[in-house]
Image (cartoon, rainbow, N blue to C red):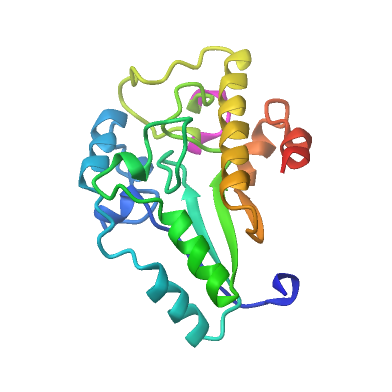
Amino acid sequence: MVKNANYGLFIHYGLYSTLEKGEWVQLKDTIPVAEYGKLKGRSAAENFDADEITGLAIDAGMKYITITSKHHDGFCLFKTEATDFNVLNSPAKRDLIKELYKACEKKGLGLFLYYSYAADWKHPYFYSRESGWLNARPAYPVSQPEYLFEKDQDFEVYVSFVHKQLIEILTQYPNIAGIWLDPIMGFYHHPDLFPVDSTYALI
């Protein structure tokens, strides 16, 4: 069904939604990591309604939905043991991906989970902006104490984190239509650091 679906809904939703300035606001406004993290305390997701979202998609003739399970800011909309920077540790206290997953299953919609693979502005061991790809980190005027990356070997900590989260996603939501890895530009800048073959084999 999903291979020939053609028409679907792509949703960007996360902490950045509270600022109403788009998903790149942390990078564009160079919001410090600690300050941006405070948005977690404001994220109640009171208007997130999986039934309404799926109903809208069906009424528009769509066959699938793609949603940001984790965008570049590192905030996760799903249950995860890998980081406390997630929706269940926010005022929402809900697994939003699970809610959408169940609604999609009930109504026969495919669900793709977008996952920021090659950019992370939160994780301490994602490679630095100076390592080659400018969007790897916001252009902060002062060093962020949360960032601990120093050498290429440090990046292996991030890869382990990613693989743990992908296992969590695929275990908790086994009937999703697929994983949508982004942004591939980060991989092109550092193909030596990203074990893409291992990641796809894991999926």
> Which residue corresponds to the image point at 45% horizontal and 47% vertical from the top-left?
78
Vertical placement of 101 versus 3: above or below? above
Magenta stretch containing residue 133, yes or no? yes
x then y, percent, for residue 82: 48, 30
Vertical placement of 148 versus 52: above or below? above
**Closer to the camera in the image, 10 or 110:** 110
Left or right of 22, for residue 171: right
The C terminus is located in which quarter? Answer: top right
The magenta segment is: 130-135
Q: Can residue 9 be seen here?
A: no
> Which residue corresponds to the image point at 43% horizontal and 43% vertical from the top-left?
76
Q: Can residue 106 be seen here?
A: yes
Vertical placement of 13 versus 136: above or below? below
x then y, percent, for residue 15: 32, 48
Left or right of 76, for residue 176: right
**Prevailing SS of the magenta stretch:** helix
**Closer to the camera in the image, 130 or 191:** 191
> Which residue corresponds to the image point at 49% horizontal and 38% vertical from the top-left?
135
